[in-house]
Image (spheres, rainbow, N blue to C red):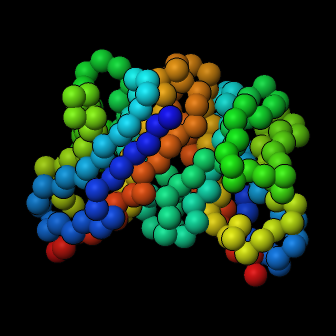
Amino acid sequence: EPEVTQTPSHQVTQMGQEVILRCVPISNHLYFYWYRQILGQKVEFLVSFYNNEISEKSEIFDDQFSVERPDGSNFTLKIRSTKLEDSAMYFCASRTGRVQETQYFGPGTRLLVL
Amino acid sequence: AQSVTQLGSHLSVSEGALVLLRCNYSSSVPPYLFWYVQYPNQGLQLLLKYTTGATLVKGINGFEAEFKKSETSFHLTKPSAHMSDAAEYFCAVTPNFGNEKLTFGTGTRLTIIP
C-alpha cells in the first residue's frame, strides 16, 4: 500500500541553523500539507500546497518557514533560522484531489533545537 | 471556522471494557469528521471518517463512531478494549468542500488496565 515517507526521522540542530525536512507524498496525490505537534500538545496545521503554490498557511508559518516541491516527488519544509520553540514533531500529509478523500500522514520528523 | 473539543485528556479502561472517547465539533458549514490514532513514537493513522451518508461509521480495529448533528458530536466507541488499543486518539474536522486543513482536538490518551 502506498504511503507517505519522511526523512530524517530525527534531527538535532543548533538554534539559528537552517533545517530542511523532506517528505515524499503518495505519487498520485495533488494536495500537500505540513503539520506540527509540540510535545504534549495537539497537532497544528502549518501550510497547504497545491499546484506549486501555497493555498493556505497558519499564523505559525511566518517568514522563517518555506515549502517547496523541487521535483515531481519531494515536498520540503525549510526553517531558515531555527528557534528553541520550533522543537516539535513535523508531519507531512497528502491527498488526492477527489472529494471526500482522506489526508494520509507520514511518520513524522522529530526536530530538536538546542 | 471549525473547532474540536475532546473531553478528557486521559482515559483508563480495563481490558474488555467499553471504550468511549468523546468529541464535539463546531463548524459553520457541514463538516467532514475524522478519528486518528497515534501509537507511541509513530505517526497518525486514520481510524475512521464521516463524510456523508450513514451516520454510524465503522473503522479499523473494531472502532466505530456516530455522527450526531443535533448534538454536534462524533464520539468514538469500541465494545471491548484490548491492550493494543493503548494510544493517543485525535478527533479532527474539516469543511466538507474538501481540500482544507484539518483542525485537530487536543487528543485523549487511552490507557488499558490489564
Task: From this view, report whether residue B74 is shown above or below residue B90.
Answer: above
Q: Position of residue A20 (x, y in %)?
A: 82, 58
Return the residue nearer the eye: A29 or B76. Answer: B76
Q: Residue at x 22, y 34 (%)?
A: B71
Q: Residue at x 72, y 31 (%)?
A: A55
Task: From this view, report whether residue B51 is shown above or below residue A113.
Answer: above
Q: Which quadrant holds the N terminus of chain A?
A: top right
Q: Using residue A48 as the reference point, say whether residue A21 is left or right of it.
A: right
Name which quarter of the figure residue B30 lies in. top left
Q: Position of residue B37 (x, y in %)?
A: 40, 53
Q: Residue at x 61, y 47 (%)?
A: A45
Task: From this view, report whether residue A12 is shown above or below residue B53.
Answer: below
Q: Which quadrant holds the C terminus of chain A?
A: bottom right
- Asked if one can make out residue B98 in the rendered structure from this viewpoint, the answer is yes
- Asked if one can make out residue B66 in the rendered structure from this viewpoint, the answer is no
Q: Position of residue B112 (x, y in %)?
A: 23, 69
Task: From this view, report whether residue B18 is shown above or below residue B95.
Answer: below
Q: Using residue B34 as the reference point, say whether residue A31 is left or right of it.
A: right
Q: Position of residue A102 (x, y in %)?
A: 50, 32
Return the residue nearer the eye: A33 or B61. Answer: A33
Q: Using residue A54 as the reference point, say whether residue A89 is left or right of it.
A: left
Q: Residue at x 42, y 57 (%)?
A: B106
